[in-house]
Image (tube, helix red, strand yellow):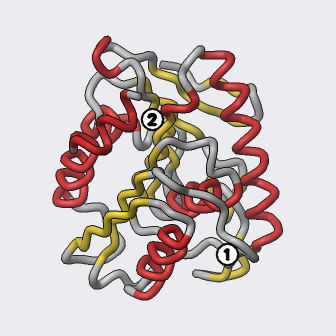
Amino acid sequence: MLPIDDLGYTHTFVPARDPAAARVTLLLLHGTGGDENDLLPLGAELRPGAARLGVRGDVLENGMPRFFRRFAEGIFDVDDLKMRTEKLARFITAAAEQYRFRDKRLVAVGYSNGANIAASLLLLHPDVLSAAVLFRPMVPFTPDIVRNLARVPVFLAAGSRDPIAGQDQPLQLAAMLESGGADVTVFWHRGGHELGRDDVAAAKAWLAEGAVRKKLAA
C-alpha cells in the first residue's frame, strides 16, 4: 500500500476484502503526529473486511501532521478548523467517486485531533457520515444551530483521567450531538488520553450491534 497524494490529501485506500462488509468504508483520521497508515490496523480490527481510507492531516505543528491548526493545547483555531472541515468534505466526495465506495455508508473513526475534525464534520456536514467512532474527542466549536443528525449513531470513547480532554468536553459534545437527534453511546476508559484495548473492544462490539449494523446495511 503506497500513499497517494491527490484529491487534496495524502491518503491510503484499502478495498473491501469481505463481501459481507463491502457496504461499509471506514474513514480513518489520526491524532497529532500520525499519518495515513496509523489507524489502518485499528480499522481492520473494528470492522474486519471493510474498505479503509486513511487520511493524513495537511497541517504541520512542529513537524507533526494535524488536521487543523490550534493556538495552544485545547484552544482551536476555529476558522481554520471550519475551512479544513469543508476541504475534508470535498475530499470525501472525490474519494467516493475515485474508489467507488458508498459514501452514504461511510463511518468516521477518529482519534484525538482526528476525532475532533470528525466531530466538526458531523456538525457541518451531517449528511456525509452514516456513523462515527470518536476516541478522546473535544467540542470542536459551538455552532449557532445543531443540524439534523437524526438516526446517526455515534460512539464516543472518553478517558476518565484524560488530562487533555477532561470529562466535561466529551459530555458536552455528546449532549450537543444528541440535541441534533444523534444516537450517542458514551464509553469511559479508565485511563487517560491513550487508546486502550477496552476502547477498541467496546467500539467493535458497538459496530456489530443490531441497530448500528442495520443502519450500515440499509
Decide: is 110 above or below 3: below
Decide: is 145 above or below 171: above
Q: Can you give x and y, in whole percent of width and height, for residue 193 in the image?
A: 36, 72
Three-letter residue code for mark 2: Leu
Tell me the residue that label 2 is attached to: 26
Q: Residue at x 66, y 62 (%)?
A: 147
Q: Can you give x and y, in whole percent of width and height, for residue 156 in the image?
A: 37, 64
- Label located before the other in sequence (2 or 1): 2
Tell me the residue that label 1 is attached to: 141
Q: Residue at x 41, y 42 (%)?
A: 39
- Of 40 and 100, nearer the camera is 100
Q: Residue at x 66, y 25 (%)?
A: 95
Query: Where, by quadrant of the figure, is residue 214 drawn?
Result: top left
Three-letter residue code for mark 1: Phe
Decide: is 89 above or below 157: above
| CA–CA distance in space, label 2 to label 1 | 24 Å
- Of 11 and 209, nearer the camera is 209
